[in-house]
Image (tube, rainbow, N blue to C red):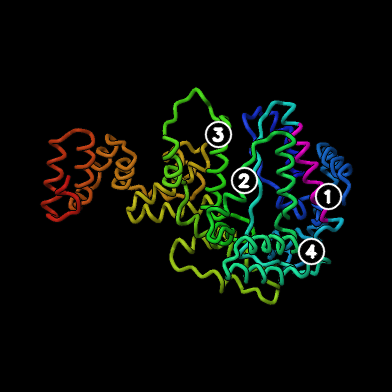
Amino acid sequence: AINSYTLLDLFPGILDQKPNLVLIYAGHNEYYGALGVGSVESFGNSRLLIKSILYLNQFKTTQLIRNFITKIFSAFASSNENAINGTLMSKIAKDKSIKLNSEKFYSGVEQFYNNIKEISEEARDKNVPIIIGNLVSNLKDQKPFISIQTDGFGNANEIYSKAKKELKTGNNIKADSLFRLAKDLDGLRFRAPEKINIIIDSISNEFNLPKVPLDSIFNSNSQDGIVGNNFMVDHLHPTTNGYRLIGKSFYEEMVKQKFLPQNETQQIPFNKQDSATIKNIMFTELDQTIGDYLVTSLKNDWPFKNENEKIPLSSLLVPRNFMDSVALKVIEEKITWAEAQVEAATYYLRKDDIKNYLNHMNVLIYQYPALKDIPNAVKYFYQKNKINPKDFTNKRLGLIALFTKDYNKAIQQLNSVDQSEFKDPEILYNLALAYYSNKNISKALNSLDACLMLDSEYPNAKKL
C-alpha cells in the first residue's frame, strides 16, 4: 500500500546504490497508498507539508512521536474485530467516493505527476536511465466497486453494463472505451484512472524515457482485446502469467535500448529465454495453493463483498489434501512461508519422493540465498527445530546425492544402508545408476543384476 510519495522518499537511497537501470511500474495506489489523498494516512493535499513530514521522519524524535501516535490508534483499533479480520484494502480507504474530475481526483493525479517528475529529474542528474511502463487493470471482469452518479457521464454500473452489451455484439473497441469509463467513474479508486497513463506518456516524452506499452500488450494477448480475469486475479493484481508478461515486456525493452551488458555472450538464445524462464521458475504447487487461498480470502472481504455477504473462512477454505492443509496454516499465520516449504519438503522426503523434496528445498534456497545449498539449509532448519534428523536415512541421503549428481556420495550412502534394505530393488537400481554415472560399469552391472533378481520387471532397469 505505497504510492509515488514512498518511491520519491526511497529514491535518493536507490541512487546511492549506483543502479545501472531503474524500472518503474507505479500509479494504482495514488489515492489509498500511504499519504494518498483518500487514505487513512493522508495529511491532506499539500505536497509541501507531506514532503516536510517525509524529511522530518529521518529524525528519531519525529519517529518516536509517530510511533507513539500509531500505538494509541492501534490500541483503539484492536478492540474492533473488523480491524483485525479485514483485509488491508478495507483498512486503508478513508474516502470511498472520489468522483471523476473532483478536487480530490485531481490531487491524486497531480501528486503522481509531481513525484514521478521529481524522480525522473533526480535520475537524469545522476545519469541513471529509467524505463517506465504504463498501467494495466481488470477492465472486462471487474465491475465498479462503488457505483456513483457523475454529472455528464452517468452511473458507473450502467456504463459497465453497456460495455458488456457492446462486447456481446462484437463491438470490442466501443466496449473497451466504455469499460475504461466505468472504471474511471468508480468512486472507490483502487484502480488508476486513465489520466495516470496519460501522465506516464507525458513524463516519458518530457524526459525521453523508454516506455513499455503494457496496456496495449496485455490487450493484444487477451480475448476480445480487453484485459480481464485471463491476466488478473482481482481488480489489478496480475496472475503468474500476467507477471511473466510484464517481466518479458520490460526485458524486451531493455534489449531494444541496449541496457544489457553488450560485451557478454548470451548463454541462452533470445528466442528461447521465455520458455527457459517458464521451465525454471521457482514456484511450487504449495505456492499456487497459498496464492489461491490469499485471493479467495481477499475477495471474501470488502470491497468485493459487504459485511453481510462474507462467508466464514472455515467454510470457504476447506483443505482437500496435505498440501492444502499446510497452505491453510500459512493463511492463518500459524506458520511462516519458509516453515511451510520445510513441511512440504519433509512430507515428500518421508515418501522417498526426492524430486519434489528437492523442489521445495531449492525454492527455499532461491528465496534465501544465504542458505547457499541444501546441506546448509538442512543444518539451519535443524537448529530451528524444524527438521528431524531421523528422516535423513542413508537411503534418502543417497537418493538426494544421486539427484544432485554427487555420485561418489550417493555410492557411499547407498552402500551404508542396513543389509536388510538390500532386499529393496529400488536401492540396488539407484546404486547401479550411481555406479554407471560414475563410469564404474562392472559394479553397475552387478547392482543391476541383483536388482533384476529381486524384481525382473523393475521399471527402467532393463533399459539401463
Q: State the CA–CA distance, disc 1 to disc 3.
A: 50 Å
Q: Can residue 110 be found in the magenta stretch?
A: yes
| Residue contact at pointers 2 and 4, CB within 8 angstroms | no
Residue at numbered disc 2: 213
Residue at numbered disc 4: 96
Q: State the CA–CA distance, disc 2 to disc 3.
A: 14 Å
Residue at numbered disc 3: 256
- Most extreme residue toward the top is 263
Which structural element holds mark 2? loop
Residue at numbered disc 1: 68
Residue 32 versus residue 246 in the image, above or below: below
Q: Left or right of 322: which side holds 239? A: right
Q: Which of marks 1 and 3 is in front?
A: 3
Where does residue 396 sit, x and y in percent of width and height? 32, 47
Which structural element holds mark 3? helix
Quarter occupied by residue 124: top right
**Amino acid type assigned to the residue bearing label 1 in the image:** Phe
Name the residue located 65 percent from the left edge and 63 percent from the top edge.
Answer: 174
Name the residue located 75 percent from the left edge and 27 percent from the top edge.
Answer: 125
**Range of the magenta residues?**
105-121
Which badge, 2 or 1, comes first in the chain's sequence?
1
Q: Left or right of 165: which side holds 446? A: left
Q: In which quarter of the image is the C terminus?
A: top left
